[in-house]
Each structure stands twice: as structure tokens, then as C-alpha cells.
Amino acid sequence: MDWDALKKKYPEDADGIDKARRIHASVAEKVRKLDIPAGTDAGPASKGIIRALPYSLLADACRQAWIEVMGNEPGVDLETALKSFVADEPLPEVGKDDQDILPMFLRPAVTGYLRALREANVIPEESVQGGGKCPFCSTYPRIAFDSEASRDLICLLCGRRWRFRRVKCPFCGNEDHNTLGYFDVEGSEGVRVQYCSECKHYLKVVDTRNRVACDAETEDVLSLNLDAAAQEEGYL
């Protein structure tokens, strides 16, 4: 995460970004101490990777980081919260002051573990080609990077990057250019929304031909206004 780029984009929230950076560093340190299972082939097991996450261990890492940064015990079941976060479901209720803080602990726990797991395992190259889901953890992408020659999809959970056709929806496989389209949002140069009228999903596309891009996780946060615009138009 490029924290300086976030502070430049959102100067009014500099204090919150600094807190997020401290939380991220603390959680990442705890997750790095966990044992990461390694094998020669993670491909066949990829569909079960999310279900098999060590939620209790990750919850303990989050709890230690919470106490370290916040100075008190979290008032929520972190294991349940992690499972809700991964499933993209509403998070458990927590104190009003901590409702926005909770995801700051959950995200780096999940992404840190999954990225370490991916780096410790090998994915057969044939399993990477053509699919819209992440070839490692089987989640759908939310962001893509376009270059002169290709489009890469990036998984925001495990960090896997893979090639994909430009005129194709990663969510439903639609290839009809009449029902695939783009729109821009003012103030977001070099990033636009690709939408599919068939399944009503959208993808944020960073055009690296027009700007120097940050990492995918940073670009996702820098383009939150595109998410809001897409969702206002009824896309998922």
C-alpha cells in the first residue's frame, strides 16, 4: 500500500490514514509469524483455499494487533468478523467508534496470509489462462490494469495477476461488445469503469498507458469514487 499516495488523494483524512498504516503494520507483523503451508501444486486445491483459511489463528493475530494499537480488547468476535469479511457479508456489530476501524484489521490479516500462501506454492500455468476468477483463491477481481498490449486482472485478496481479454466480462463471460461498456468519472484520470449489462457487474480499469500506476490495492482505494458511481448506476 502506498500510504503517501493515499494522503495526497485524501488530505482531509491524513490522521485516519496514519492510523490505518499503524494497524496494517501491526497485523502484518503478527501474520508473518504464522506457519505457511507449502506444497508443489496449489492449483487443484484453490477452490477450497478461502474455506480452509486458519480463521482462529488470523483472529488471534488481529486481536493482538488490536490490543497493541487500540489499547483495549476488541468488542467483537474477530473470527466471525473475518468470515463475514471474506464472504463479503455485513460485518458483526461493534461499538460505534470502532465500526470503521474493524475492516482495517481484517483486510491485512486475510491479504497478508493469502499472499504469503500464494508465494509459497506453485500454480500450474494452464490453470491461469482464460478464467475470470483468480486462479489461486477463486475470488473475482475488482480491478484491472491495461497496457499497450494486454489487460491484467488483479486479485485484491491474494495479489495474483493474470491475463484476460479486454472485450469480455470476468463475471459472466459475456463477449458482446453491445452489452459491454465503459464510463468515466470526473477527477479519476486514467481509471474508468467497465460494466456488463448482462450480469450487472463492473470492473475498475487502470490505463497504465496514460499514467504511472500504484499497486492494485492502492489504486482500489484511490478510486473509491468509481465504486460509488458504479453502484449508484445499479452495478454490483
Image: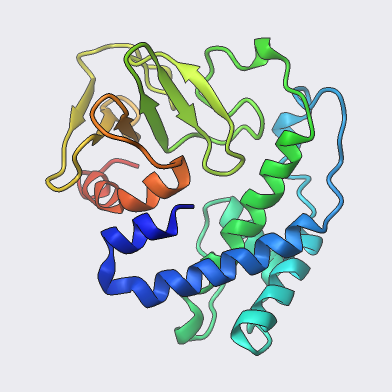
Give percent across and percent down for residue 232: 21, 50
Q: Residue at x 56, y 71 (%)?
A: 22
Q: In this view, does 25 lie above or below 89?
A: below
Q: Residue at x 28, y 64 (%)?
A: 10
Q: Residue at x 12, y 46 (%)?
A: 186
Residue lying at the far bottom of the rendered structure: 72
Q: Which residue is drawn at 35% across and 37% down?
A: 213
Q: Can residue 96 be seen in this view?
A: yes
Left or right placement of residue 115 versus residue 191 in this view = right
Quadrant hosting residue 202:
top left
Q: Can residue 100 be seen in this view?
A: no
All told, the count of numbered labels is: 0
Depth check: give the residue in front, 109 or 213.
Answer: 213
Give percent across and percent down for residue 228: 26, 52
Depth check: give the residue in front, 55 or 153.
Answer: 153
Depth check: give the residue in front, 79 or 204.
Answer: 204
Left or right placement of residue 85 versus residue 47 in this view = left
Depth check: give the residue in front, 71 or 231.
Answer: 71
Left or right placement of residue 222 versus residue 109 in this view = left
Quadrant hosting residue 7:
bottom left
Give percent across and percent down for residue 172: 43, 23
Give percent across and percent down for residue 47: 70, 31
Q: In this view, does 71 lie above or below 29?
A: below
